[in-house]
Image: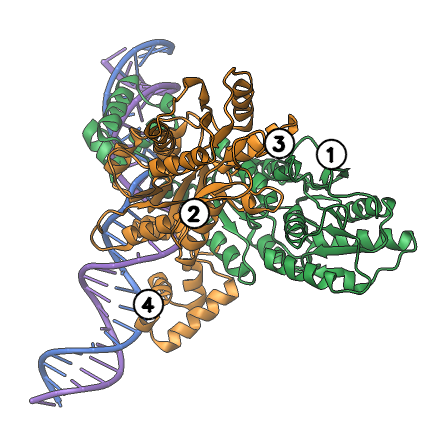
Chain colours: A orange, B green, C blue, D purple
Amino acid sequence: MVSSKDVAKAAGVSQPTVSRVLNDPTKVNQETLDKVEKAMKELNYRPNLIARSLKQQKTKSIALISGPLHNSFFVDTTTTIVNYAKEHGYHTFVYFEDQGDNLSVYDEVLKQQVDGIILSSIFIDDPIYKELEAAGVPFVMFNRKHQDGGNYVEIDNHRAGELATNHLLKLGHTKIAWIGGPTYTSTFHGRLGGYQAAMKATNNEVVPEWIKQVDTTEESVIQAVDELLLLNNKPTAIFATTDSMALDCQNYLMQMGYRIPDNFSICGMDNINITAHEAIQLSTITHDSKKPMGLYAIEHLITMIEAEETPPAMQLTLEPKLIIRETTGPKR
Amino acid sequence: MVSSKDVAKAAGVSQPTVSRVLNDPTKVNQETLDKVEKAMKELNYRPNLIARSLKQQKTKSIALISGPLHNSFFVDTTTTIVNYAKEHGYHTFVYFEDQGDNLSVYDEVLKQQVDGIILSSIFIDDPIYKELEAAGVPFVMFNRKHQDGGNYVEIDNHRAGELATNHLLKLGHTKIAWIGGPTYTSTFHGRLGGYQAAMKATNNEVVPEWIKQVDTTEESVIQAVDELLLLNNKPTAIFATTDSMALDCQNYLMQMGYRIPDNFSICGMDNINITAHEAIQLSTITHDSKKPMGLYAIEHLITMIEAEETPPAMQLTLEPKLIIRETTGPKR
DNA sequence: CGTTTTATTGTAAACGGTTAATTTCTGAAA
DNA sequence: TTTCAGAAATTAACCGTTTACAATAAAACG
């Protein structure tokens, strides 16, 4: 690999002069500048960012620790974050959440000396929060948040749960199932709380068998639906707390010969792209902000990284909004 | 940030001893090893991988330059690649293809000293190929390939084009539209060639107006469909050369009140997940290999990175396979 | 014309590790 | 007792940059 030393030799100057050409060309004589730039071109010189990072104590790289892309919600956020970062001169390391072994990811990321971290995969009382704070690296959470606060952008999950549930109640459903991920995450915790609150507020019984905690994979959703189908007091509507899972429900129920919404109403959440497809038409919950959630996160992260002094924490809870499409209908 | 020097001081040893504890603990006395490890723990020491990378001249990081995730094909490949890389100790920088400004991405990536590159976004005669070769960094292409060969995994696009077209011909369609991306990429070049070959082989006219080259965005697909709808000899079937575009066609035509496949047959390509959804049921093309395409790519890349001497080039062309679902039907 | 600025370049040190070469120490063999 | 091998630790050099500081020469000043 050709280094600035090689360029210096070729141009007949000292190596720091080459460095100056790169960083502050006004500080160098026009004549030498030409010489050096010519040598750079001839040798096809590319500055070594690793060396620069070491010296400058910043890497111009960030880490995105994201939920799995098979949930399209994370497709949008990943795209937004990676592209915005790139436009602002940052490179993005991407990692996908791992059942279990998450700690090693954080550890690796910190060793990599990233300038900041964006994460969606934190638990309400995740000990990683304190570790990250101790490491002193800026980080912002999106989608999920932590009990200790910090910087985050989320949707009002409780309110969202109420919204979806009330929508189904208003259609005449009273036997409403809830399918979601682990409630030690703020998202599902809130969405479950909202569901329960809405049921109670209307004096509807919440039967424990209607509440299905799954690991959000298709198989686990299918199993949950199977179990619901075997119940005596079978629900007539399902609040599937992510669109990804709602699609799995819809698909499986249709495969089993049921008609949506005639036999079952399904309401999802996230308003991922495909839900608007004419053949899908999934009722869902979105938020009423112009900016996508990932954008808030990355904008704020880069502000934090580049600000002289720590800016005030971003604690953003977006207002949820119901989108009624064709997968929810009156109880028959 | 606490460095190995701090650990050394705390443990009362020299700094290289700390390094040896990290890299080859057998070379260090049990007693000192304990001392050092204790100090590491107490100070919460994390080795600086940037410094290590500089010295070792390898970063244990790779770059993935991918097509946009809104095409779900790249969702699967990205997931596969990032996860496999991580399991093998590599960190993945992700970039999404950019209309136009691709060169700067490659430049940035090379400056970052990545150990290898995986890319899907290369043109048949892309000059970047020679640049990458000159830079001496291992790289493998997936999905698309380059005229000069190199390391790649692709699907037989010509064959795939024939397969899809023949399927539609057999259903009685003779007026078949082709919608695809720019033909200076090997994928669309091949898929168009196969379509034309199949038409000619059956003595069917290929009307130039039926061939729509778009930029693969939803808007451009909609515009193409609009134009097709205005033709006198309107096609009765569409070969949309990625599932992403096929879904856009299906959605738009349904919105316009057409019925699929009664009014139009649609065949996609890639077999992305959602196409199997009961409400979508898109006919499509896949390949008959057990491994996903991205896996071939990343496996080979890591082999290239870690092999003593350059392994033989991987030039893999997977056999396409037709999946018939419900969006293609007999001509009415 | 001597002295002070200013512009430009070079020298040296540093970032945090790895690793080759060297030193120190121990204990066994002669 | 002397010698020497081997183990374990230290010292020094290096990776490719940036940057503080010193040196030099040219320009500006009174």
Q: Is residue A40 above or below residue B302?
A: below
In the image, are marks 4 and 2 on the same chain? yes
Can you identify the residue that label 2 sits on? A92
Which residue is at 64% across, 49% downward?
B251
Q: Are marks 4 and 1 on the same chain?
A: no
Q: Mark 3 — on which chain does it sit?
A: A
Q: Position of residue B281 (x, y in %)?
A: 69, 38
Amino acid at dot 4: Asp
Numbered tag placed on residue B288 in the rendering: 1
Query: Reading the chain from its start, which is encountered first: label 2 or label 3?
Result: 2
Q: Are marks 1 and 2 in contact (CB under 8 Å)?
A: no
Q: Farthest residue toward the right?
A: B203
> Taking A77 as reference, is B198 left or right?
right
Q: Position of residue A41 (x, y in %)?
A: 50, 66
Three-letter amino acid code of the residue under disc 2: Thr
Which residue bears the numbered disc 3? A259
